Image (cartoon, rainbow, N blue to C red):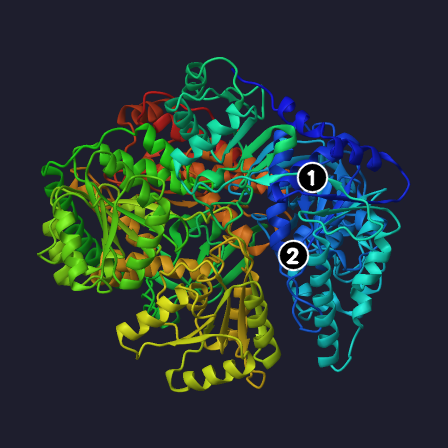
Amino acid sequence: MQVSLTDFFDVASRHPAFLALERAVRTPEPQTLRLSGLNATAKALYLLLLYKQTDRPMVLLVESNPVAEALCETLTAFHDLLDFSKHRGPPFVLPAHEVLPYHGQSPHPEVSERRGIGLWRIAEGAASIAVVPIRSALMKIPRKEFLRNLAWRIELGDEFFVEDLLEGLASVGYGKHDPVEMVGQFSLRGGIIDVYSPEAPHPVRIEMLGDQVESIRFFDAENQKSIQRVDQALLLPLTEYPVAAPGRVNENANGDAEDHEILPLGWEFSAQSTAARTGSILDLFDNPLMVWSERAAIQADGEKLWEKLEDGYEASGSVGPAPANFYFTPSGFAEEAQRGSQLHLEELAVEAAGESWLHLGTQPTPNFQGNVPHFVRELQAQVSGGRRALIAGHSPGDVERLADILTENEIGFQLSLKDPFKAASPYLEEKARLAGPLANVMLVESPIRRGVTLPDSNLVLYGHEDLFASSDLVARPKKGKSARSTFLSDLQDLKEGDLVVHAEHGIGRFVGLRQIEHAGRREDLMLIEYAERARLYLPLHRLDLIQKYHGAGGKPPPLDRMGGQTWSRTRARVKAKLLDMADELIKLHAARGKTPGFAFSADSNWQREFEEAFEFTETPDQIQSVKDIKKDMESDRPMDRLVCGDVGFGKTEVAMRAVFKALGDGKQVALLAPTTVLAFQHFETFSQRFASFPIEIESLTRFRTRSQQKEILERLAEGRIDVLIGTHRLLSKDVGFSDLGLLIVDEEQRFGVRHKERLKQLTKNVDVLTLTATPIPRTLQMSLVGLRDISIIQTPPRDRLAIQTVVAPSSDQIIRDAIERELARKGQVYFIHNRVETIWRIAAYLQKLVPRARIGVGHGQMSTRELEKVIFKFMRYEYDVLLSTTIVENGLDIPLANTMLIQRADLFGLSELYQLRGRVGRSNRRAYAYLLVDEDVELSSTARKRLAALREFSELGSGFKIAALDLELRGAGNLLGSEQHGQIAAVGFETYCRLLEEAMRKLEGEEVEEAARTTVKLRLDLHIPTDYIRDETQRLQAYKRLAEIRTREDRSRLLEELRDRYGSLPKPVHHLADHALVKSRAERMRIQSIERKRGCWMLRFSEDSRVDATRLMRFLAETPGVTFSPDRLLEWPRTEKQTLSADTALKDLDALLDRLEHRPETPAKIV
């Protein structure tokens, strides 16, 4: 029942005009060709067919970046449907920069990366069709050989100087970062180089033996473990502007990121960087075909660019390189293009005298806007008229939905799979079988948006947006990112002066690391300061006792007294409070569980269709959250689940799937939002998402008139409204549902006590889903298992771009350019000014600076209604610029707002800057955040570090560990309430979580013992050599992980990981692992201490020791010289060799513990 698409497209390629064009393109002599009649979809189709038939690379010139992205998306869709296995790579966009010379701004890193890779691809001869906006085509570029040398191709056995590679990577945009977690990072550890190249499936680990490549392997960015050996690695450039020529040795051989950060903004347009840029893009291709798509629009945009360049040069006082150093004039580029063959594509051509045009007639398909009967009538007319039809569904769900429509209307169809070896779903196979014999209608899964009719070829193609609702976003391909939690307890961000928590002594201050040498033994120590300047020198092999202190915001706690009672009393107090809280939560949980709820049905076909209609790829966290919610809903216990996730991370989509499930069983749904603005935003989102389904959605806010509210309440009570969205008005007593099955509460913590009491009455046997944008740590989620069901969405959407963060002086030019550029792409701007007294003066200043901007002003001293009015106008695009204090709604999701300027950014805290910046970059548009600092202000070192940190972590999802952690801990305090907030501050977050877990186990009847602490004094050489792990932070992390070894499996896994990351293991590292294993076994046996003294092993047992008495007696009877005293001290004389050598001493002790431990089997010895 499945057929290939070859026949369908072969018919299109047999059109006389296309055949004439193909013959002309095969001719090597330069010529100018003209083809008219093609709409955008037809252009993409025929250009792909032309490339497939001639194998001639193309430069496809268009007017702008948005046009290029849309056309390339359609080209890529056809490329995936046709067989291009023997040709070059897929089409791609070579984007134009959104900043120009003379403005003192650098290009967006994402644009630089795409340009660097694209130009390298062209120079390598690996480009099929490059879609190039005119502003990109006019840029002068370096010669082909220069661009080819920007990438590194490394194979097994290659020989090179490591310093050359590091310098080369740093010069083309890579930054030094260990561990390597994200694209564009590299690190060096001994002879091991880690690099994450763009377009690579995983980062690569290159192991050197001297100057020769010994091993190349992919590794997992999340856990840093190697996963696959490969023979070669391709390291692509992240920019076309190398800082220093690749291969040249200079002082920056280590590639430190700090060395590059001193480059001034806009250095890419300096005289030095443009010296080698003399050629055009056409020089990089071998015999390309230059295609102009709508030449008049292209020329107009080229002229506009040149005017801006000349104006900018004049405004700069004619300082620096002239525009001609960077760009061709439009007429100059046209002359360059005349050296080769050109093809002019026009949808509607006006033939001038002497011009010869080929014409290939096409017609656009109708936009049915979800009107299925209209679509069916149109399709039946096309088929009965002798035409063949291809219908594109964006997702498997779309294809299944289309199959249902065709089957119900008795229209036969075939499944046309782009991969003939891949089977369709059983559901589709069955539908196709029932549709009857081979027919003239074909279904295919493809992201083609708009269709086209080819009358002369008797073909019609329908895009998925012809039938269903459209989207403004261009979906980006999946790009792997590490979902590593920002909350890590491995001391990776520990700095001198930070607070730490010692399990026995409490809260102290980390002073630094010290190394001592005694009797030929070296030992690394952590120095911790306590109250009254008392100091503790802690051996690093005891780092299992240490956690970094993380409070919940606010004032830091006082230092504890070392060895005093303060810490133990604090722990006891917190433990008691936790028991009370856990007991209360368990009772609430149990009471809810006793009330029978409604068990919803399993997913229907409609549910699957609804979910497949989601335009973008779900993140792993979204998928898991949906699974959790469905499981809750299908049980007969009322759901009470909290979903945490940043704004724009997909909580609403997760909630809408729960809504659809509830509606499938005939239940009503209520969504409660804390403000009118958020309720309106939810109403708009729900209305758009459910548009293709017969669902009645209404909103109830103060924006509804009294008569409208009355009519809505009547329909609600009669069951004629399926989903009601509103503010606390929903909690009024006159609001009555016919059959409420699901309540969704957005930001519950923002409702008052009275509203929460009313919520409790409403939700006794109704499923409740609570959404919050306040993040909380995953560790807290684990601790609350059984108390509250929590799902966390931490992974950002895959179509979201990084925010370019610029620290810049607050100047008229920078502010004007930033606003003008955003307005030029029909976007909106946030301008943050955090002083109400001067905000109107700033509004007048901005209006004078950018007269055409429509400016709205919002601040915290306005009434709620006034502020809502301003924000509504901004949401509806009635304002271009929203000038506000930090009070403006944080939950807003405004995709068009993608530039933010923050005045006096040096006065904000890191977390505050992080939250503010998060309001932009919520679509697939490039976003900019300008941290403006007054030029005459001397920055404090703290402010300087804060701004540098924000700029450094502009890459989305890169961690931003300090600020993200701070927000998570505030979220933890909000979730648990003010009293528990204080308990977190008293003992630190990790101790709090451990005590909470113990409280839970105790309440469930489990016996909770105090953890045993065995003192081990063996006087052995236990350290990690500094030449093995040079980075102090990483060495500290390794010590901590070695100290936390509990089993032989832990030991094997960790040693293998260290060997993989740092190379062959030195003996002392083996000894540290063995020492940790012996200590761990001794603690399980509840041995108080193990000591080497006077040539004896001395083991002191605790009163509740788990040493097997029978085994102990046998050991005493069989072993000469061993003694056991009444105070439970075992002394076993050994030779000097058995106690002084770390190798033999640790094996000897391991064997002794084997003989004494109470367990059925004997483990293998330490090796």
In this rendering, the count of numbered labels is 2
- The numbered dot on residue 207 is 1
Q: Position of residue 1012 (x, y in %)?
A: 31, 43
**Front tag of 2 and 1:** 2
Rendering quarter of residue 53 = top right
Position above or below: 1030 against 567? above
Task: Kindly state the secondary structure of the residue where label 1 is placed.
Answer: strand
Judged left or right of residue 130, residue 787 is left
Answer yes or no: is residue 451 visible. yes
Position above or below: 858 against 649? below
Between disc 2 and disc 1, whose residue precedes?
2
Rendering quarter of residue 479 = top right
Judged left or right of residue 351, residue 238 is left
Q: Amino acid at mark 2?
A: Ser
In depth, the one of 863 and 463 nearer the eye is 463
- The numbered dot on residue 115 is none
Within-10-Å neighbours for mark 1: few <14, some 14–19, many 20+:
many
Name the residue located 72 percent from the left edge and 68 percent from the top edge: 267
Q: Position of residue 689 (x, y in %)?
A: 37, 45
In depth, the one of 481 and 100 nearer the eye is 100
Answer yes or no: is residue 1048 visible. no
In depth, the one of 738 and 22 nearer the eye is 22
Within-10-Å neighbours for mark 2: few <14, some 14–19, many 20+:
some
Q: Amino acid at mark 1?
A: Glu
In depth, the one of 803 and 896 nearer the eye is 896
